[in-house]
Image (cartoon, grey):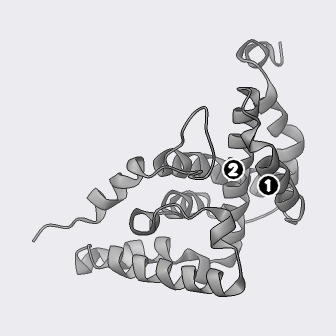
Amino acid sequence: MSSSFFALAFRQKYIKRWGLMRSVAPETLSEHATDVAVLTHALAVIGNTYYGKQYDVGKAVCCALFHDLPEVYTGDMPTPVKYFSDTTKKSYKRVEERAVDMLLSKLPDELIPAYEPLLRFEKTEPELARLVKCADKLAALIKCIEEERSGNREFVNARAATERALAAMDQSELQYFMEHILPAFDMTLDQMQADGE
């Protein structure tokens, strides 16, 4: 019997994000997962280094890598649709849960215990769930910044909404990133290379 779990996971590269927006640089779910994993790692390390947090960095990164995997079944639901109402949000959560069940059913029984916590971490790991959510929003903000820098005004409102959402998140490591690291995303390559010289 073959297991299709990993083949399904690799299909993230075919799922486009920002479906309602015109993008200068289209983004796939696979690219997004990588960005969120890198940002989650940074936030966890910042939290542990500067704020006395005790994040399991490896576990946090793995959760980030798998955080949107159910979308190989559901696709990337546009935010205005996903959060249209409480009813819509609850219905979509049920669809996501069903997608997780389907993904887990594609694994050999012996591997399910290793992957189920990564696909259901939002329920069992609230601290890591908050961290990944911060990284997810940061990735969205960085995408908006990149699109605006390319002359695409399509992302102006998305950027403002994402900035508001990030400002409402009470995470010290996120505030550190926003103050000390995020400004570099507005730099040119030459400015980045000269930074600190």
Q: Residue furthest left?
A: 1
| Residue 117 in the image, given as x and y percentages of width and height | 48, 76
Q: Residue at x 26, y 73 (%)?
A: 106
Q: Residue at x 72, y 32 (%)?
A: 152
User: Is residue 65 shown left or right of residue 84?
Assistant: left
Query: Which amino acid type is marked by label 1?
Result: Thr
Task: Look at the image and tell me in which quarter the N terminus lies.
Answer: bottom left
Front one among 120 and 150: 150
Secondary structure, mark 1, is helix
Q: Which residue is mark 1?
A: 162
| Residue 14 in the image, given as x and y percentages of width and height | 39, 48
Front one among 44 and 142: 142
| Residue 142 in the image, given as x and y percentages of width and height | 72, 42
Q: Spatial distance from mark 2 to mark 1, Cα to Cα?
A: 7 Å
Per the rendering, the mark at residue 140 is 2
Q: Residue at x 44, y 52 (%)?
A: 15
User: Is residue 142 shown left or right of residue 96?
Assistant: right
Q: Residue at x 79, y 12 (%)?
A: 194
Callout 2–callout 1 Cβ contact below 8 Å: yes
Packing grade of label 1 (10 A; few <14, some 14-19, many >=20) is: some
Secondary structure, mark 2, is helix
Q: Against 15, is 89 above or below?
A: below
| Residue 3 in the image, given as x and y percentages of width and height | 20, 67
Per the rendering, the mark at residue 130 is none
Query: Which amino acid type is marked by label 2?
Result: Ala
